[in-house]
Amino acid sequence: MDAKGRVEDMNEIAEVLTGFKVTEARHQPLQAIVNLQSARDGNLANSVARLCLSLRTVQRGDESVILRRRDGVHYGIDYSMSPLGSDGAGGAVLLLRDVTARRQAAKAARWTAGHDELTKLANHATFEARLSAVLEQESTGIQTQHGLCVIEIDQFGFINETYGVAAGNLVLQRLSEELQRKIRGVDLLARLDGNRFGILLLHCPFDKTKLIAETLRQEIETLTCAWHDTEIKVRASIGIAEVLPRNGNSTELLAAIDQACLKARQAGGNRVKSVIGSSQELARNSHVLTQFKEIQTALYYDRFELYCQSLLPIASDVSSLNYCELVLRMRCESGEMLAPRELLIATAGHHLLPELDRCMSKVSLKKPKPARPDCALK
C-alpha cells in the first residue's frame, strides 16, 4: 500500500482472501479491496491505514475482526499493518492471516466446556454460574422474583438396567426436547447430571413457578419413548424453590432443592415438592442431605466400623456373665467418625435403617469372637 492508501501489490494468498486479482486491485483504495470488519466499527481498513501512517506504529487486530471477501464469504482474520520507512512515506505493508479454523476450534471448545454432549443443553457448571450471577444481582437490592426447578427422572436406574443404557439415553434426549419446547426463551434449561435437569425461571413469581412445575410434571407423565417393541413410560419428581439471597448461595440452594426432589421420590415420585423455610432451615436441610449422600457412599465402600462397650449390672444378683454392646460407627471421607446420633437421624429420615441393619450384621460376622469365654455379645 502506498502513502495515499492505495494498493500497490498483493500475493496469491491475498487474492484468495479478498477475491480480487492483483491486476484488479492495483491502484485501488485499500478499503475497496480489503473489507476488514469488526462488530463495532464497520470497515476498518481506512482507519487502520491512517493510524499506521500518522503514528508510524504497527497496528494489530483483535479476535473480533473478520474479512468479508468479494463474494460475501467471511474469514476470521488476524492482521498487522506496519509502516515502511521511518517517515511513513514508503507506505505500509498489510499482513493477513486466516484464523477461521482456530477460532472455530476455540468456539467449539468453549461450547463443549459449557454444554452436555448428549442433550446439547447447558451443563451443571454453566447452570450454577448463571444461578450465582442471578443471586448476586438480587443481593445488590434489585429485587426480582425468579424460580428454580430441578427435575429428576423416577426409576431411571430401572430403565437402564431393564432396557439398557442406550434406552436411558433416548429417554434423556426425549425429555430434554420436551422441556425445551415448554419453557420460555429467557429461561435456562440444563442437564445437571445423570437423570437430573435444572430450569432457571427468570422473572417468575413463586406461585407461577409452582404452576409451571406442576404443568411440566403432567406433561412428563404423558411422555412415552418407543424402544424396539415396547414403550418406556417416563415419570419425574420435581423440586422447586425461590431464587433469593436469603436462601443461600447457588451450591446451598441446589443442595436444598435436591432434598425437595428426594422428598418427592420418598412420597412415591411423580410429584412436586417445594423448598420452603429460612436460610437456617435450608442450611440444615443441606447438611442433612450431605450426610445422607455420604452415608450412601460409606455403605457402598464399607466404611463402617464396629465398636464394643461393656455393659455393667446395677444390681448384684445377676448372671456372672459380662455383656457388651456393639456400636456401628461410620468413618467420613474426612477421616472423622460421624456421631451415632447424627447417623441414626440421617438414616431414619431417609429410610436407610434396613440397609444399616444389614451392614451391622455383615460387619459383626466379620469380627472375631470375644477373647474372654465369659463375655456374651448382645
Image (cartoon, rainbow, N blue to C red):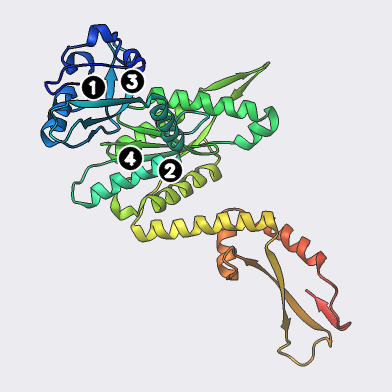
* Local SS, label 3: strand
Give the quarter of the figure containing the C terminus: bottom right
**Image vertical order of residue 334 relative to residue 172, above or below:** below
Q: Amino acid at mark 4?
A: Gly
Residue at the disc numbered 1: 36
Q: Position of residue 180 (x, y in %)?
A: 41, 25
Q: Amino acid at mark 3?
A: Tyr
| Dot 4 crowding, Cα within 10 Å, few <14, some 14–19, many 20+ | many
* Local SS, label 2: helix
* Local SS, label 1: strand
Residue at the disc numbered 3: 75
Q: CA distance from mark 3 to mark 4?
A: 42 Å
Q: Nearer the viewer, mark 3 or mark 2?
A: 3
Whichever of labels 3 and 1 marks the residue nearer the N terminus, that label is 1
Mark drawn on residue 125: 2
**Quarter assignment of residue 300:** bottom right
Residue at the disc numbered 4: 147
Whichever of labels 2 and 1 marks the residue nearer the N terminus, that label is 1
Q: 20 or 206: nearer the eye?
A: 20
| Dot 2 crowding, Cα within 10 Å, few <14, some 14–19, many 20+ | some
Q: Position of residue 124 (x, y in %)?
A: 45, 41
Q: Nearer the viewer, mark 4 or mark 1?
A: 1
Q: 90 or 286: nearer the eye?
A: 90
Residue extending furthest right? 373
Q: Position of residue 84 (x, y in %)?
A: 20, 30
